[in-house]
Image (spheres, rainbow, N blue to C red):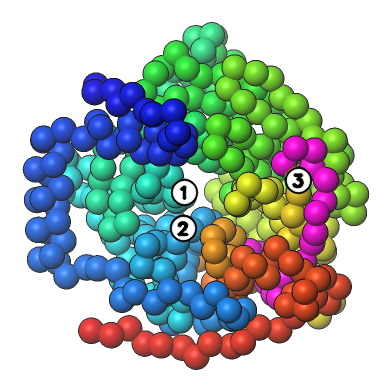
Amino acid sequence: MIRVIPTSHESNDVRCARRFFSRVTVRNTWLFIFAFSLLALTQVSLLPAQQPDSSECHHVTLFTPLGWAISGAWSQEGNLLVPDVLGYGVAAVSSSGDVSPRFQEKLGSVGGLLLKSPSTIRPAYGGYLVEDDQSDKILYVNDHLELLDDPILIGNRKMADNLRLLEVYDWSPMSEGILAFGDLESPEEYQESAFLYFDFDDAGQNQIFYRIAITDNVRNHYTRNMPYIATLGNVGYILFMDERPAIGEVTFGEGIRRLQFFPEDFRSRPQLVRREAWTNAGMGARQATHFYKSLEMSTMAAGLYAWDGYLYLLAKEAIAQNGETAWWLIKLDPRDGMELSRVRLPTGAAHLTVVTGEVWGFIEKGPVQGIGAMHGPYMKTDSMVLIPAGWLEDPYGGRLDARSRTHCVKSRQFTTKD
C-alpha cells in the first residue's frame, strides 16, 4: 500500500483522506468509470441542488415517508442522504421535502459488491462511510455513493487478546478507524460487549476501553440505534448510561477520562426491556411496541453528538398527555462536560434522528405501531425540522426560546420532477 507522508500543517482529517485516496488502484479507477457509465444508463441521480435555508427554521413534510431512518448526512448538493433500513436503500431527501428514488443495490456492479441493507452513514475523510447490515461491512463512498476503496469488515473481525468482534451496534469514525460498541467472543466462546477502537488497515492497532457483561441491562441502551458515541478528530466520547449517566473521553493508547459535569436533570437511567425479551419471541408486534413505548415514557439522555469542536447532548422528557415529547439539545464543553447552553427543540415527535451540520436536521418519527411490511418496528416518518446551526449556538438571542417551544416556518411540499 502506498503511504503518503503528511506535511506538518495538515489536519488529521486531511491526512486520513489522503491516505484513503492513495489506496485507490488503477483497477478501481476502471471500475469507477464502469460504475459511472452504468449509473448514467439507469438514470438514477441525486436531486437538483437545493441548499438548506440557513436563515430560518423550517418544518418540512416529506413527499415520500421513510421506513426506518436511524442516521443521515448532508451531501454536497444540500440533500440529506438517509439510509432506509426497511427500504433497503439510501434516500436523498431535499430541504423542501422531496425524496429521490432509493439507491437500491447501488454498488451491485462494482467489484461484485452489493449494498443489501444500508443502516448507518457517517461523513468521513472527504466522503462517507456507509454500514451494510447484511454483509457486516463498511463501504467508503463519495457523494454519489460510488465506491472509493475496498470494503471494511466489521463483523467476525479479529481483535486483541485472541478475541473476535462478532457484531457492531454503534460506531463513529475516529483517527484512522472507528470507535464502536459491539459484541466480542473469546476462543472459549465466552461472550461480552465492549466499547472499543480498531484501525481500518492495521489489525494490531485496536483497543478495548470498557467491557460490559452480555447480561447487563445497560447493554439495551447501546444496541437500540441510539447514538451514544461521538468523535472529534482523534478523540472519542462515550455516553455511559450507568445508574448516573456520565460522558467519558477516550483516546487510542490511553484509558477513559470521565468528564466532571453532566446535566443533573437528565442524570437518571430508565430500565428498558431486555433485548432477548422480544428477539426470542420473534420480534412480535407487541414486544417491539412495548420496548419503544418504554422509551417514549422515559425522561433520559437520548444521544451524543459532536459538531464544530463541541459536544451536544440530546435529551427528552417523558411523553406528555397531549401526545408530544419535549426535546432538548444541550451544548457541552468537551474538556469537562460543563453545560454551555440549551434549547428546547421545535418538535414534539416521539422519536428523533439527528443530523449535524451548518443546518441541523431532525427527522421526526412517530410512536412505534407494531410491525411493518418489512418485518421491522413501524414508525410513521414523514416530516423533519431544519434548524440553522447559529440558532443552536445562541439560544438566548430570540431565535429559539430556551424555555418554550418555538414554531418553525412550514415549508410547502414539492413533488418529484421527472
> Dot 1, crowdedness within 10 Å: few (<14), some or many (≥20)?
many
Q: Which mark is residue 122?
A: 1
Query: Is residue 84 visible to us here?
Result: no
Q: Label 2 to label 1, Cα distance in Å?
A: 6 Å
| Label 3 or label 1, whichever comes before in sequence order | 1
Q: Position of residue 418 (x, y in %)?
A: 23, 84
In the image, is 231 to the left or to the right of 88?
right
Residue for point 70% across, 52% down: 312
Quarter where residue 140 is shown: top left
> Dot 3, crowdedness within 10 Å: few (<14), some or many (≥20)?
some
Q: Position of residue 65 (x, y in %)?
A: 47, 75
Give the quadrant of the N terminus: top left
Do labels 2 and 1 touch, CB within 8 Å? yes
The magenta span reads 334-353
Compared to residue 181, the image places residue 346 above or below, namely below
Q: Nearer the viewer, residue 54 or 31?
A: 54
